[in-house]
């Protein structure tokens, strides 16, 4: 059985080496199992949004942590910022990535690498993580009115 955490481990590895085919293969292999279990992949990407200290990795009482208070979650030892009480209740169903590294120093280029597994190339356009997952998990009966693939 493939878990969301299993799938999320692969893009972080892909991003670190700038190579996405193993992730696409893993999604393809796990798609039938995930469809049967009614699973979905939601990427919450908040570019320019609140920092990790105000979301899923607060550091109260730390010199770099700011003034955000931490609250307990449904996972023992995992704490979220006080502004996320509903997410804290369902934390056992989330795969939170608190650390991501890349040799790419430019944020826009690193974001592209993370979303596609490839470094930006002006002569190529690569599918995003959401498009790869949607192509494998697309249902004939949409769960909502949103399109399954980025346009």
Image (tube, grey):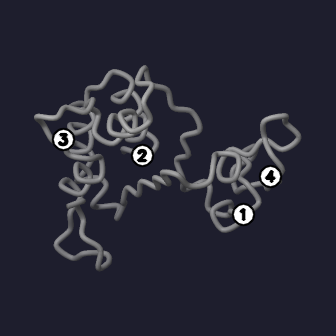
Residue at x-position 29% and y-position 33%: 117
Q: Nearer the viewer, residue 144 or 37?
A: 144
Residue in view at x 24 percent, y 57 percent: 134
Q: Which residue sits furthest bottom?
A: 145
**21 left or right of 100 in image:** left
Query: Which residue is at a point 24% across and 30% down the rendered structure image?
Result: 22
| Drawn side of residue 46 relative to residue 32, left or right | right
Q: Residue 146 in the image: state x and y as whole percent.
A: 29, 74
Q: Name the N-terminal-most of marks 3 and 4.
A: 4
- The image shows residue 57, relative to residue 147, as above or below, that is above
Q: Mark 3 points at which residue?
A: 126
Q: Which element carries disc 4, helix, strand or loop?
A: strand
Q: Residue reaching furthest right?
A: 61
Counting other residues with Cα less than 10 Å from the Cα at mark 3, is it few (<14), some (14-19), or many (20 or more)? some
First in sequence: mark 2 vs mark 1: 2
Labelled disc at residue 83: 1
Residue, disc 2: 3
* Residue 70 tag number: 4
Tell me the element at label 2: loop
Q: Which of marks 3 and 2 is in front?
A: 3
- Which of the marked residues, 3 or 2, is nearer the chain's N terminus? 2
* Quarter of the image where the C terminus is located: bottom left
Q: What's the CA distance linking mark 2 and mark 1? A: 27 Å
Query: Badge 4: few (under 14), some or many (20 or more) residues near its Cα, within 10 Å?
Result: many
Q: Note whether 129 is above or below 109 in the view shown.
A: below
Residue 141 in the image, given as x and y percentages of width and height: 21, 76
User: What is the x, y in percent for residue 90?
Assistant: 62, 62
Q: Is mark 1 on a helix, strand or loop?
A: loop
């Amino acid at each position: 059985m493939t878990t969301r955490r299993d799938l999320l481990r692969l893009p972080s590895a892909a991003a670190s080496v700038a190579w996405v085919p193993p992730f696409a293969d893993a999604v393809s292999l796990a798609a039938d199992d995930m469809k049967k279990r009614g699973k979905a992949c939601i990427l919450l990407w908040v570019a320019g949004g609140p920092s990790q200290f105000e979301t899923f990795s607060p550091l109260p009482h730390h010199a770099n942590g700011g003034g955000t208070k931490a609250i307990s979650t449904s996972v023992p030892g995992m704490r979220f910022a006080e502004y996320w009480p509903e997410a804290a209740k369902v934390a056992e169903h989330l795969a939170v990535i608190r650390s991501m590294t890349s040799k790419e120093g430019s944020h826009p280029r690193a974001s592209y690498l993370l979303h596609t597994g490839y470094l930006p190339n002006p002569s190529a356009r690569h599918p995003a993580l959401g498009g790869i997952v949607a192509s494998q998990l697309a249902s004939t009966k949409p769960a909502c009115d949103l399109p399954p693939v980025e346009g």
